Amino acid sequence: MSEYIIKNGHVFDPVQGIKGDKKDIAIKDGKIVDKVGSGAKVVDATGKTVMAGAVEIHAHIAGPKVNMGRIYRPEDKLFTCTPTKGMERMGGGASIPTTFKTGYEYAKMGYTTAMEAAMPPLFSRHVHEEIRDTPIIDEGAFPVFGNNWFVMEYLKNKEVENTAAYIAWLIRVTKGFAVKVVNPGGTEAWAWGLNCLSVNDPVPYFDITPAEIITGLIEANEYLGLPHSLHIHPNNLGNPGCYETTLDTLKLAEGYKAKNKFGREQVMHLTHSQFHSYGGTNWGDFESKAKEVTDYVNKNKNITIDTGNVTLDETTTMTADGPFEHHLTGLNNLKWANIDVELETGSGVVPYIYSPSISVCAIQWAIGMEIPLMMKDPMRCYITTDHPNAGPFTRYPRVIKWLMSAKAREAQINAFKHKDKVLSQTSIGSLDREISLYELAQMTRAGPAKSLGLTNMCGGLKPGMDADVAVYNFNPDKPVANPDDIEKAFSRCAHVFKSGVEVVTNGEIVSNGHKRTLWVNAKVKDNPQVMRDINEKFLKYYSMTQANYEALGHHFVPNPYTLEVDAT
Amino acid sequence: METVTITMKNPPALYLEADNVSPDGFAGKTAAQIAELHVHEGNTTSTLGKYFEVIGNAGATAADTKIIVKGDVKKVKYLGFKMSAGELVVEGSMDQYAGGWMTGGKMLVKGNADAFAGTAMKGGELTIDGNAGNYLGAAYRGDWRGMSGGKILVKGNAGSDIGMYMLGGEMIINGDADVHVCTHAEGGKVIIKGNCKSKIGGQMVGGTVIVFGSIDTMMPGFKPAGETELEVEGVKGKIFPLYWRHRRTQKEKERSDCIRGPVPEDLIQFLYQPCTANQKSGDPVQSAPGQFPYPIFFYTERAKK
């Protein structure tokens, strides 16, 4: 493999505590090394910003509901198609891009690892086929557990060990990465035409509450010692006043400590927290409760969050929270798709336009800004747009611009039609904090990598780590004349290296890299009861046999990277 | 105004997508530069000059440019795509997407125009001397934003699904229209001087449809509301207004009002007139053949965004 040396760049690496010092980064055999030989190819990064490849902790980029969006929104591809060009295959789509475009767009922005946030286990083969077809970036997928019949039946009887054995089995056969929970109990209740809007609403038939599902899954997750913690989308998403449910959910993590060998410290990751920080009683008195939520998270070190920033675009919402999408289509009257996934989960899809002239959308934007600006520890708060729910991931450079420049935020606030309402219902007007490049590296690299348990692998530039490096055309020594320059610089990298291979040069794809699928192989003691339960459920309820369930072999996972966990 | 004439000399084997043929695409270019503009034949990109002979230079702006398209362009799509000003005359018949997404200017098709003419049109005038195909002035596949402004005149007949998701503007069909008129429409006006078949105004929540001729079958959701006199396009006659029973529940309406702004009070009552679909007078209204020019007039309304 080639050797490279990236010379004279301003390096920002929270893993080693480097804050913009001029430093050379050496790459050899796919890893960061101390030094390379004189034959190494020199990349001049003078006057440029050098960071590790960014890590996406939560995006919907592969699988059946993403594809449902693609199928039923042909208009999303209207005028957004790009023809074959050099290394790039044709692509299209704005909020739900094709797999190829997804890989290219992430790479061009300097992202080298991404997590698919909700994999229905029954459709894991579909998820992995799309992951396989997404070039360059390493990907993992979180199977959803919060409405799973096995989980609810075991946890009703407080059988944490059986739950853990089931999780280990399911993650192994679906080649999953972490335990995801979406509207615990609520999506199952949706199959009965109901929902769970608080952590104490009973799930019909199963006689269990969301709170019991959440604490049971935290215990099972820590029993196994998985790399990532429980990754939760709580109940009551997106409704005025939902912050109380959010706080009730976060409080369930109290008293739990992380137990794992991956350096992870949290036991719960609250995702797209923007959607869960709403106050008020209706859309008229809708207001921000970002302060209440971030105050709690700031005090409790065993929780990490991501933002879910609204980007003010036309997009496609999609979630395993089926009842929420039904609620949303009632709000905006746009087309609705619903998917039921047998014993496991469900989902819904609805297009949405976050219009700057609608006060609710503008307030949502402001809440998304408040959360990262109010979080004291950037290592525990990560930038996402919950792609494509609050906006497409291709808008990260714009979110970065808003976070790094109070001037850019002010310009956006002044552009809102209901500016006064935004200022009265949120505290965005009083926040003048500007995120530094070092904090940005924490929020997009070191932080999410640590939360995912990948801290020894990616998110930093320490010798021995994977050589995922992004070089931006951004000179931290020069004052920013125009905030749009920030957006431009973070949109297209000067150079991106993925596992030591140069994949982007001057914003163009030059290699498809060696994309890997990250998955977790958790070993547990033989558990005949769980194996018997699985057999029985497949015979009795599933529409397919176990033989057709597993995502196995070269077709689905051509280039796996396995994280081994021993919980025997 | 400068005139550019392009004449088909080398007809394509496959369908040709000529999305550069518009006053906007040609503005400021010489004949030689125009011949270099790209077109797509199947998956192959080539130049306009490969198929067309180009005579004349364009004006400095779209408004100063007139284009005349001659020869057989029955297999050419997207003429007048996104045009904003100027003039475009197609001497014969063309394929799909005549004047698609146009925002201004005048386009005339002397022959027929196939499906999707005036798709998502926002302004300008589109005249079709012959017949129009399906989805005239409709939304793009999957989209919910159809024609929102401008004027379409079809001197012949129109196909099915015209005015689907129409939001505004005006469409006049001198002949007949096939099934599905103004499905999902939220605004605008469609006048059909000939006859209609069925499924007019399905899921329509706003806008106006006026039919001079007969309707084979009217949708059961419409409720007759007496008789009145009206003059439409110079024709004065007895009309039978029909109001569509609005299906949203009060609760759903309240929710969406938060997003879209409040509905004026007088309209709320009007929208929620109880529908007595099975009552004798609630049978579909049909004007017997030969009663032309007594127009039947459908009108539904709801608050604009």
Image: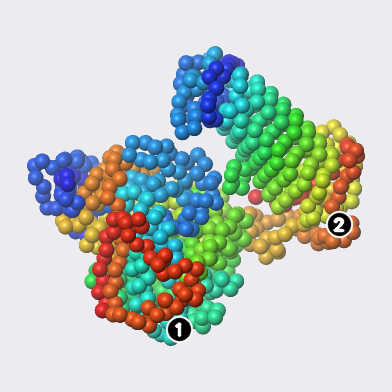
Share a chain, discs 2 and 1? no
- Residue A321 screen position, x and y as percent: 50, 66
Q: Which chain contains the residue that carries disc 2?
A: B
Q: Position of residue B71 (x, y in %)?
A: 61, 19
For badge 2, the amino acid type reads Gly
Residue A45 place in picture, x, y as percent: 21, 42
The span from disc 2 to disc 1 (Cα, nearest Å) is 55 Å
Q: Amino acid at mark 1?
A: Lys
Q: Residue drawn 55% across and 30% down?
A: B15
Q: Is residue A535 above or below residue A481?
A: below
Q: Is residue A459 left or right of residue B88?
A: left
User: Quick check: can you spot residue A407?
Assistant: no
Q: Is residue A141 left or right of residue B41?
A: left
Q: Which residue is mark 2?
A: B282
Q: Judging from the image, what secondary structure is the residue with disc 2 in? A: helix
* B89 lies above or below A182: above
The residue located at (32%, 39%) in the rendering is A87
Residue A330, placed above or below residue A2? below
The residue pinned by badge 1 equals: A156
Q: Quadrant of residue A292?
A: bottom left
